[in-house]
Image (tube, rainbow, N blue to C red):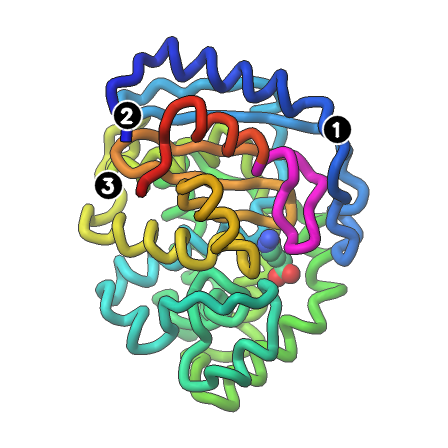
Amino acid sequence: MNKNLTNDQIKAVVQEAYNVVKSDTGGKNADYIPYLANVSSSLFGLSVCLPDGEVIEVGDTGYVFGIESVSKVPTAILVMKQYGADVILQKIGADATGLPFNSIMAILLENDHPSSPLVNAGAISACSMVKPVGDSAGKWKAITDFLGQLCGSPLVLIDELYKSESDTNFNNRSIAWLLKNYNRIYDDPDMALDIYTRQCSLGITPKQLSICGGTIANRGVNPVTKTQVFDKALAPKITSMIATVGFYQHTGDWMYTSGVPAKTGVGGGVLGVVPGVMGIAAFSPPLDDAGNSVKAQKAILYIANKLGLNIF
Ligand code: DON
């Protein structure tokens, strides 16, 4: 991997990627959560956080959008921080599913484990594990405090999105109770589901998301605040899980094409992690059939190819 890049070179390529991808019209906003269907499809932002703390921003990088499934990443790190990395293999799993993010089939195929904390089942399981167990307010504080440290500034709940998700999360309710049946929920199932739904409804900007990626790429040290947010030994653990299942049933295709571990959310955000080099965030609401932002994928791929970021 080419690590001798200057900040100016990177800046120029991020701007180029924005210009090249901006007018792409592929994909469609998520519509199974009413709030997301109404977000402007033309929003587009790219941000890159470098280990020296410089944050590159192009486009709508201050827009607050729903973090959605990207929130699975910080909560997985928090669970490892609270219990140690081995707990993931013991209680959840770190496997690919090859199936959609909300798959019930994945649970039935592997009821011994919910596969990974980066798919809905494993994420609900992870939320059930967050300490203090049995204390919804305490769990919420632990998750939001940790996210604020990863991103270098606090995230705020989008109330309307939370309501929209809570009113329509029937599939996730089934997942929570099916996992309870398999002894893979480690707190009250409804509380775990509510914490998961709420964390998906947090608002984040592309700039904050890139700093979160930069903190993972920088082995737990937030490049902007210079604070050690989590132990460096956890960085390869979370990055390997992102590489394994970050794009759900399209993960293999994405890794084969780009070589950049990345995690998507149906709000249109994608978080890319290039270990030791940068965190990349791209945001654009229209999604492909797996729930991954079309423009975000194209922009990250462009940047990866131009800068030689393939980790393999
Ligand atoms: O659980 C859900 O359906 C949403 N709150 C999050 C799903 C999601 O972001 C999947 N990622 N692409």
- Residue at 54% over, 85% down: 108
Left or right: 135, with 215 as reference point? right
Please state if 43 lies on the left or on the right of 109 as rendered: right
Q: Position of residue 85 (x, y in %)?
A: 24, 63
Q: Residue 123, how many percent across, how many down? A: 48, 65
- The residue that appears at 70% across and 54% down in the rendered structure is 289
Q: Secondary structure at mark 2?
A: loop
Q: Which residue is mark 3?
A: 219
Q: Which mark is residue 42?
A: 1
How far apart are the two marked residues, 2 and 3, measured between alpha carbons?
18 Å
Question: On the rendering, which quadrant does ligand 1 occupy?
Answer: bottom right
Identify the amino acid type marked 2.
Asn
Q: Is residue 200 visible?
A: no
Going from N to C along the chain, the mark reached first, 2 or 3, is 2
Nearer-N-terminus badge (2/1) = 2
Disc 1 C-beta below 8 A from ligand 1: no
Mark 1 neighbour density, 10 Å: few (under 14) some (14–19) many (20 or more): some
Q: Is residue 94 above or below residue 177?
A: above
What residue type is disc 1 on? Answer: Ser
Q: Quadrant of residue 168?
A: bottom right
Dot 2 beta carbon under 8 Å from ligand 1: no
Label 3 to label 1, Cα distance in Å? 34 Å
Q: Is residue 302 visible?
A: yes
Residue topped by disc 2: 2
Q: Residues within 10 Å of mark 3 (few under 14, many from 20)?
A: many
For residue 287: magenta?
Answer: yes
**Picture layout, residue 21 above or below residue 212:** above
**Residue found 58% across the figure and 49% down from its top:** 265
- Specify start and end residues of the magenta stretch as a single range: 284-297
Amino acid type, callout 3: Arg
